[in-house]
Amino acid sequence: MAAAPDPVLKQEPTTDAVDLENRILELCQQNPKGIGDGVIQADMPHIDIRQRVSAVNRLLSTGRIDLLKTATGLLYRLKDPQAGVKIKSSDNQEKLIYQIIEESGNKGIWIRDIRYKSNLLLTQVSKILKNLESKKLIKAIKSVGASKRKVYMLDNVEPDRSVTGGAWYSDQDFESEFVEVLNQQCYKFLQQRADNARATKQDPLAVRNACYASLLDVRKYIMELGISKVDLSVDDIETILNTLIYDNKVEMTIVASQSSASIDGQMKLYRAIEPLIKPTGLTRMPCGVCPVFDQCYIGGVVSPSNCVYIKQWLELDF
């Protein structure tokens, strides 16, 4: 008769595993906004990926870190130990509102939606929101999409770019001059790279390839100029380069790459271009490319008398 199998014992983490968890917590403390897998891997390259995943899962299951989904990927952030204590001392209605706001993540939730989900009166919801704000559990953020509307999210959550507008907004105002300066400098960098490539007098294909620059190359140039007070991400630079593509000043190509900066083995490269032929007079003026040309008339919403593009084109004040 076969012996009964031994019961499965719950394995406690080893000393090395505990040290790994403590190091991940230290990294989270050093980066309050959160860290990605890349930060952990760079700090501990000798640790096997399975060990890292196991350590992160234990920290998540024990409630010592939070998992956040951002535009750049998943982030691990140190959990506020006081949040649980504060919410435990609240009544059921406060706990319900807190849970609804927590579920909204980094995009937040409008008070009307909170009221709908909680089935509470507006006066009750308003009072509870003020109490939670006073306890530093939640915060109210003005959305750039609706300046008169506030959305609520947990106090330790970094708002999504769709709420704050990202680097292009300051106090809900679009920084058009800042965007224009970035536009000019990005184009200048690509032009300089093209000029340097032509100066080598190599064969045409080699010159063409030397004109291309990656998003990281452009970002490094912009950050070294010191013209931005905020830390621009690769996505921010890509947005600027897209505007240059729409203006037919830059072209983009995708190449296979094994670089750490590539995504799914592919990398985007950009170069400044010159049009083969000069545009005709009509297409050079705003009216020639205006998508609402047929709706433009004196006294209308779209009118030549208040068209900012014509003013810029003529360089006149009228």
Image (cartoon, rainbow, N blue to C red):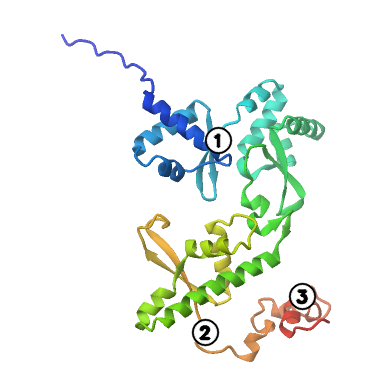
Label 2 vs label 1: CA separation? 51 Å
Label 3 packing within 10 angstroms: few (<14), some (14-19), many (20+): some
Label 2 vs label 3: CA separation? 30 Å
User: What secondary structure is marked by label 2?
Assistant: loop
**Tag 3–tag 1 contact (CB < 8 Å):** no
The residue that disc 2 covers is 275
**Tag 2–tag 3 contact (CB < 8 Å):** no
Place of residue 14 in the rendered image (x, y in percent of width and height, measured from the top left): 36, 23
> On the rendered structure, is 93 left or right of 244?
right
Q: Find the residue positioned furthest to the left.
A: 1
Q: Which of the 4 image quarters holds residue 180?
A: bottom right
Of badges 3 and 1, nearer the viewer stands 1
The residue that disc 1 covers is 29
Q: Which of the 4 image quarters holds residue 29?
A: top right
Label 2 amino acid?
A: Pro
Place of residue 52 in the rendered image (x, y in percent of width and height, measured from the top left): 39, 36
User: What secondary structure is marked by label 1?
Assistant: helix
The residue that disc 3 covers is 302
Question: Going from the N terminus, do you reach mark 3 or mark 1 first?
Answer: 1
Q: Which mark is residue 144?
A: none
In the rendered view of the protein, which quadrant contains the C terminus? bottom right
Q: Nearer the viewer, residue 83 or 44?
A: 44
